[in-house]
Amino acid sequence: MIDYSIKQVIEKSQLSAKERIKLYFEMRSEYYESYPSISALSLIQETLDHEELISERNNEIYKSRVEFIRSYIDIGKMSGELRSDIDSEILTDIILGSFREITIKWRMSKYAFSLKEKVISTLDLILQMC
């Protein structure tokens, strides 16, 4: 599974917390750009909820992604790389929500822009403020 592979690469890296968060979204964006149809799965959660097995697996994947990003936010806060007064859950929601919104715009534009470039420039802006 791609999430497992991405996480393994990041876990083995010697990057800072911010760099690991950025690498995670670079790799997910590249994957979506290579396989645009797979990005639709992350956008149809409500439809998947009607199929119990698919819904359960989708929820597991989502929770795993949230926890992965939140863990690096917490590491960044502890190391002083990120502001300690920012709520980790809220920052996680902002980052993941931005990725989702950009993915929707990318699909609606018929892939007219680089998903990776837009995601990373947005993530850089968010992380600079933190």
Image: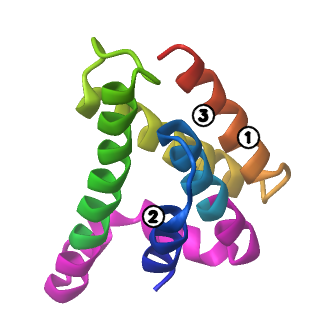
Name the residue rendered at 22%, 71% in the picture. 60
* 3D distance between C-alphas at marks 3 and 2: 20 Å
Q: Amino acid at mark 3?
A: Leu
Name the residue rendered at 47%, 17% in the picture. 130
Among numbered discs 3 and 2, the one appearing first in the sequence: 2
The residue carrying mark 2 is 11
Callout 2 touching callout 1 (CB < 8 Å): no
Q: Amino acid at mark 1?
A: Lys
SS at circle 2: helix
Mark 3 or mark 1: which is in front? Answer: 3
The residue carrying mark 1 is 118
Mark 3 or mark 2: which is in front? Answer: 2
User: Is residue 71 toward the left or the right of residue 95 in the image?
Assistant: left
- 96 in relation to 52, above or below: above
The residue carrying mark 3 is 123
Q: Residues within 10 Å of mark 3 (few under 14, many from 20)?
A: many
Q: Is residue 93 visible?
A: no
Q: Which residues are magenta?
A: 29-58
User: Is residue 76 toward the left or the right of residue 13 in the image?
Assistant: left
